[in-house]
Image (cartoon, rainbow, N blue to C red):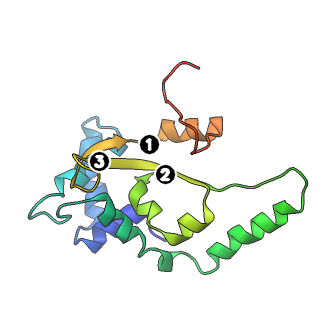
Amino acid sequence: MPDSTSEFLKAHGIDPEHFWLTEVKALVDDGYDPTLAYLKRIFDNSGDGKPLGQLTNKALSDFGSTLDSKFFHGIPQVFEDLRDIVSKFRDMKVEFYIVSGGLESIIRGSQIVNDQFDGVYGCQLAGDTSDGPLRYMAFLLRMCSRHLILSIGANPTQNVEFGSPT
């Protein structure tokens, strides 16, 4: 399956190749962090009269719900099979997490993700109200953040404060 952000862009008439290789790359070449660069370009394409329109987390989640048909056939069964295998061992449990620099609202829109994953970490966007148009970056997952989450084995039910003393 192509990445969900590129699928979202394509669904709104934005050429993903041009978006990533021209628009985002230009910002990265100017010194932007890649995650900040792509999110800036998402916001540049959001708003009245722009390809993404008045972008909301609900719209992102609704789009994410359309992606389940793009997963490889049998993916849900893989998770169930792995859980069954591990359940045969005493004091063992397998958990699945998504750690992505993509848009968390799109990822969480997938029923497969909701059914099979124990947690999702991704970039979060916010507006002035919980259901209003998105205008801000609320939580970013950059490459170093993803490594930190993986190395500390964070549980999504824990409040993980990045950069705070331990």
User: Circle 1 is placed at which residue position?
Assistant: 141
Specify whether 7 is left or right of 80. left
Q: Amino acid at mark 3?
A: Ala
Outermost residue on the left side: it is 49
User: Is the C-beta separation of discs 3 and 1 under 8 Å?
Assistant: no
Q: Is residue 125 above or below residue 17?
A: above
Say which label, 1 or 2, has the lower sequence index. Answer: 2
Say which label, 3 or 1, has the lower sequence index. Answer: 3
Q: Amino acid at mark 1?
A: Leu
- Label 3, residues with CA under 10 Å away: few <14, some 14-19, many ≥20: some
User: Circle 2 is placed at which residue position?
Assistant: 100
Say which label, 3 or 2, has the lower sequence index. Answer: 2
User: Is the C-beta separation of discs 1 and 2 under 8 Å?
Assistant: yes
Specify whether 166 is left or right of 88. left
At a point 24% along the width and 71% down the height, the residue shown is 12
Specify whether 34 is left or right of 150. left
Q: Amino acid at mark 2?
A: Ser
Disc number for residue 77: none
Which of the 4 image quarters holds residue 9? bottom left
- Label 2, residues with CA under 10 Å away: few <14, some 14-19, many ≥20: some
User: Circle 3 is placed at which residue position?
Assistant: 126
**Number of numbered markers:** 3
